[in-house]
Image (spheres, rainbow, N blue to C red):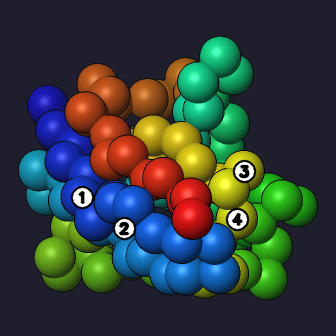
Amino acid sequence: QVQLVESGGGLVQPGGSLRLSCTASGSVFMIYTMAWYRQAPGKERELVAQIDTRRSANYADSVKGRFTISRDNAMNTVYLQMNSLKPEDTAVYYCNNAWPSEWFPWGQGTQVTVSS
């Protein structure tokens, strides 16, 4: 079964940058469209960015132009480069399959806090 481990979160000032990583166990990682999600306190989990097996990416309007998703299939890892961070980006960030019907067990997530 695929296990997901997210890392790279932290406290950053508005305008700053962070790079998140998500490593998946299992050799089938490369066949899935992977995504980053986030959940802010009191809000539902939302999809932030996704990348398919050909590395074609899509983004939520709220992060377009600021976030970049990428993947390294050899390392079973998906990344999220986050630039020009805003306080409203504060959330716990998770990675998973892009399709809800194919979600893997959720990892612990990584906390991103944007505050001065």
Q: Is the C-beta separation of discs 1 and 3 under 8 Å? A: no
Element class at badge 2: strand
Quadrant in the rendering for residue 75: bottom left
* Circles 3 and 4 in contact, beta carbons < 8 Å: yes
Q: CA distance from mark 4 to mark 1?
A: 19 Å
Residue 29's mark?
A: none
**Between marks 4 and 1 in the image, the one whose residue lies nearer the viewer:** 4
Q: CA distance from mark 3 to mark 4?
A: 5 Å
C-alpha separation, residue under disc 1 versus residue under disc 2: 6 Å
Place residue 57 in its image quadrant.
Answer: bottom right
Q: Position of residue 70 (x, y in %)?
A: 47, 79
Q: Residues within 10 Å of mark 1 (few under 14, many from 20)?
A: some
In the depicted structure, whether residue 83 falls above or below residue 46 = below
Name the mark nearer the viewer: 2 or 3: 3
Give the amino acid at mark 2.
Leu
Q: Could you tell me the amino acid type at mark 1? A: Ser
Question: Mark 4 sits on what residue?
Answer: 86
Q: Which mark is residue 88?
A: 3
C-beta proximity under 8 Å, tags 4 and 1 = no
Cα gap from disc 2 to disc 3, whole angstroms:
17 Å
Check disc 2 and report the residue beneath it. Answer: 20
Residue kind at label 4, given as amino acid type: Lys
Disc 1 and disc 2 in contact, CB within 8 angstroms: yes
> Which badge, 4 or 2, is on the more N-terminal residue?
2
Q: Is residue 65 visible?
A: yes
Report how far apart the C-alphas of labels 1 and 3 lie in the structure. Answer: 20 Å
- Label 3's element? helix
